[in-house]
């Protein structure tokens, strides 16, 4: 067991990535749930950077809606690559437009969400996903060491 732990081969690859995908989806859906909280949404509309956007209220609701929908898609593993692309765009917009490019400290979380979404764009949904059920298992997916 110790040799397998230190091996360069994947360890619980499918299960670990599926768990990560589901946790990221839960976190993103949690943030997107604010779309139903009018007082919180009104606070966002007071920010100067939001006021400067074209159609600021529409943009705030669009961003939060994307967070909610992509989070749900990640949880279920449904349209994972499309959801990942939308999440990347949403999080990079937050990081570089709303957060003025401070991805290294103050707006680190949106940047990290974008990187994780990029990871799932490349890997796909892996195990426990509706994508695998509807579209079939990929033959290219790495398999864990026996």
Image: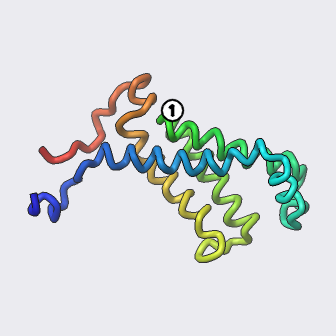
- Residue at 86% across, 65% down: 47
Residue 18: name its quadrant. top left
Q: Position of residue 33 (x, y in %)?
A: 69, 44
**Are there few (<14), some (14-19), or many (20+) residues within 10 Å of tag 1?**
many
Q: Residue furthest bottom?
A: 105
Q: Is 120 positioned to the left or the right of 16 in the image?
A: right
Q: Is 15 positioned to the left or the right of 114 in the image?
A: left
**Mark 1 highlights which residue?**
78
Q: Position of residue 134 (x, y in %)?
A: 43, 22
**What colouring does the structure picture have?**
rainbow
For the residue pair 124 and 20, the one nearer the viewer reads as 20
Q: Which quadrant: the C terminus?
A: top left
> Is the residue 141 above or below the residue 105 in the image?
above
Count how many numbered circles sit on residues in the image.
1
Q: Position of residue 111 (x, y in %)?
A: 58, 64
- Residue at 42% across, 39% down: 125
- Residue at 62% across, 71% down: 103
Q: Position of residue 82 (x, y in %)?
A: 56, 39
Q: Is 95 positioned to the left or the right of 119 in the image?
A: right
Per the image, label 1 sits on a secondary structure element best described as loop
Residue 72: name its quadrant. top right
Q: Residue furthest top?
A: 134
Q: Is 114 positioned to the left or the right of 101 in the image?
A: left
Q: Which quadrant: the N terminus?
A: bottom left
For the residue pair 91 and 71, the one nearer the viewer reads as 71
- Residue at 88% across, 67% down: 48
């Amino acid at each position: 067991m110790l040799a397998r732990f230190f091996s360069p081969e994947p360890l619980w690859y499918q299960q670990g990535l599926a768990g990560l995908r589901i946790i990221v989806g839960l976190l993103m859906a949690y943030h997107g749930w604010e779309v139903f909280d009018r007082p919180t949404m009104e606070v966002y509309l007071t920010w100067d950077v939001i006021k400067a956007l074209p159609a600021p209220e529409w943009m705030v609701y669009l961003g939060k809606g994307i967070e909610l929908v992509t989070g749900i898609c990640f949880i279920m593993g449904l349209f994972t690559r499309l959801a990942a692309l939308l999440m990347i765009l949403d999080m990079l917009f937050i990081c570089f437009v709303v957060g003025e490019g401070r991805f290294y400290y103050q707006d680190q979380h949106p940047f990290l969400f974008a990187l994780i979404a990029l990871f799932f764009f490349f890997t796909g949904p892996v195990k426990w996903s509706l994508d695998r059920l509807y579209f079939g298992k990929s033959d290219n997916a790495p398999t864990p060491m026996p």
